[in-house]
């Protein structure tokens, strides 16, 4: 029996990983032979890239809050609403809030002279007390 005739008692379960010989980017690294295009630093830069490099970098925090801050409506602002029912749409019509999807909350700053019915809007404790003291009511969701 010779050395090259020896066999394993248990053959390998998996093939051995290669050792890194014969890679794909040896010698000229795919640049061909000599010449300007084979030298370091050769590249045709697009105009868009030059413009990007001239722009300032973004600085500061990038992650904005998932829920935008609530739009605030004070109790004395409710006097500007026509009618006695206050909902998101009546506040938009009165110009007290923007129509975007930001949340709305009614706070208790100021005084009320009329009775209002507030529908499906969050209300602070002080605003709730003032609305109910003026004879109004709050309809929950």
Image: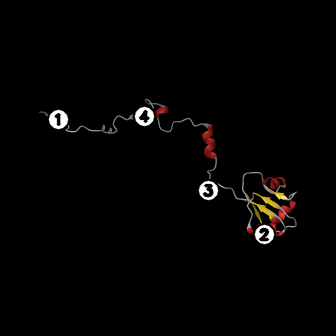
Q: Residue 53, located in which quarter of the rendered image?
A: top right
Q: Residues within 10 Å of mark 2 (few under 14, many from 20)?
A: some
Find residue 104 and name its label.
Answer: none
> Which of labels 2 and 4 is toward the front?
2
> Which of labels 1 and 3 is toward the front?
1
- Say which of 137 and 9 sits in front: 137
- Labelled pair 1, 4 in contact (Cβ < 8 Å): no
Q: Residue 48, located in which quarter of the rendered image?
A: top right
Residue corresponding to mark 1:
6
Find residue 29 and name its label.
Answer: 4
Residue corresponding to mark 3:
61
Q: Residue at x 74, y 51 (%)?
A: 100
Residue corresponding to mark 2:
129
Of pointers 4 and 3, the one earlier in the residue sequence: 4
Q: Residue 39: horizontal and vertical position, in percent? A: 47, 35
- Labelled pair 4, 3 in contact (Cβ < 8 Å): no
Q: Residues within 10 Å of mark 3 (few under 14, many from 20)?
A: few
Give the spatial CA distance, label 2 vs label 3.
40 Å
Of pointers 2 and 4, the one earlier in the residue sequence: 4
């Amino acid at each position: 029996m010779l050395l090259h005739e020896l066999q394993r008692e248990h053959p390998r379960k998996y093939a051995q990983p290669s050792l890194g010989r014969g890679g794909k980017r040896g010698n000229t690294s795919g640049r061909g032979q000599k010449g300007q295009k084979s030298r370091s630093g050769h590249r045709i830069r697009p105009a868009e890239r030059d413009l990007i490099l001239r722009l300032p970098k973004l600085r500061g925090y990038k992650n904005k809050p998932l829920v935008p801050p609530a739009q605030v409506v004070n109790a004395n602002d409710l006097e500007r609403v026509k009618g006695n029912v206050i909902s998101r749409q009546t506040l938009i019509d009165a110009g007290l809030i923007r129509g975007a999807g930001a949340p709305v909350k009614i706070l208790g700053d100021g005084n009320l002279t009329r009775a209002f019915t507030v529908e499906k809007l969050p209300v602070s404790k002080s605003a709730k007390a003032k609305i109910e003291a003026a004879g109004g009511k709050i309809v929950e969701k």
